[in-house]
Image: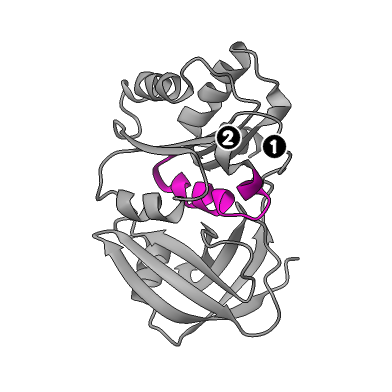
Amino acid sequence: MAQSRNARLIRAQTLGPEARLLTFALAEGELGFAGGQYIIVNTGVDLGGGKVAKRAYSILSADDEQRQFQIAVRRLGQGPGSNFMHRIAEGAELAFSGPWGKFVSRGVGTGERLLFATDTGITAALGLLRGTLSRVEAAATTALWFVQSADYFLPPAFAHEAVASCCRRFSVTAAPPPGEAARLSAAHLALESALGKAIPASAYLAGDGAVIYPLREKLIELGMAREQIQLEAFFNNPERRVAS
């Protein structure tokens, strides 16, 4: 069973209509995370039936600071977890476990690198790009955020500033909403535009599983090795449905 830890909220910033940036300080020790990993927050919100709302959030701050860390939370309608995280006040303590996840940079610098994020997957992308191992590949990295609108989550200007020195090129492309028939074809076009004629040596895809899994297959068709493509599905994860 994962060990629970505690952190205190030391700063809360509203970044948009549905986005809140939260900075936490650990009660003791260091977090020990690598860029791209996440934590699981125990909100304490009772869901009934003996269940409590626990939510995963990618760490988007750089991993050379381990005593403090940042997460960003998008409010999801009346969702109990995200609304709790939008109400929590500075000074409050929160229980969590982690870090978790294998969506981390290998830091090998063997050629062109692609990072493609959809929707809230931008948090995993920002965390990975800002990671210590990832920064050695900054000059060879093209990053793209496929997102519905400028006010969907984090402001594009915030994302641009966060990765200004972490990649060669970062772009934001408008995306049809999840579930729309045109969404996948639009993602393929965005991928082709980002790649140009170059086939990456490594790729990191985060966000909507209904988009990033087909994009992985497209990259394999283009000649990439499957093991050089890492995925982090935030929702619509086909592997999770099969496993359940």
> Any mark on residue 109, and which?
1
Q: Is residue 119 magenta?
A: yes
| Residue nearer the viewer, 53 or 58 | 58
Position of 80 with respect to 244 (left or right) is left
Compared to 24, does 225 lie above or below?
above
Provide residue 74's location: percent of width, then percent of height. Answer: 36, 57
Residue at 44%, 26% in the rendered image:
194
| Residue nearer the viewer, 122 or 138 | 138
Provide residue 76's location: percent of width, then percent of height. Answer: 34, 55
Residue flagged by tag 1: what amino acid is it?
Gly
Q: Which residues are magenta?
A: 118-136
Judged from the image, the secondary structure of the residue bearing numbered disc 2 is helix
Provide residue 17's location: percent of width, then percent of height. Answer: 23, 60
Judged from the image, the secondary structure of the residue bearing numbered disc 1 is loop
> Dominant secondary structure of the magenta stretch?
helix
Compared to 219, does 47 lie above or below?
below
Q: Is residue 242 magenta?
A: no
Mark 1 neighbour density, 10 Å: few (under 14) some (14–19) many (20 or more): some
Residue 90 in view of the camera: yes
Report how far apart the C-alphas of labels 1 and 2 lie in the structure. 8 Å
Q: Are marks 1 and 2 in contact (CB under 8 Å)?
A: yes
> Any mark on residue 140, and which?
2
Q: Quadrant of residue 64?
A: bottom right
Residue flagged by tag 2: what amino acid is it?
Ala
| Residue nearer the viewer, 5 or 114 | 114
Residue at 71%, 44% in the rendered image:
107
**Outermost residue toward the bottom?**
91
Quadrant where the C terminus is found in the figure = top right
Mark 2 neighbour density, 10 Å: few (under 14) some (14–19) many (20 or more): some
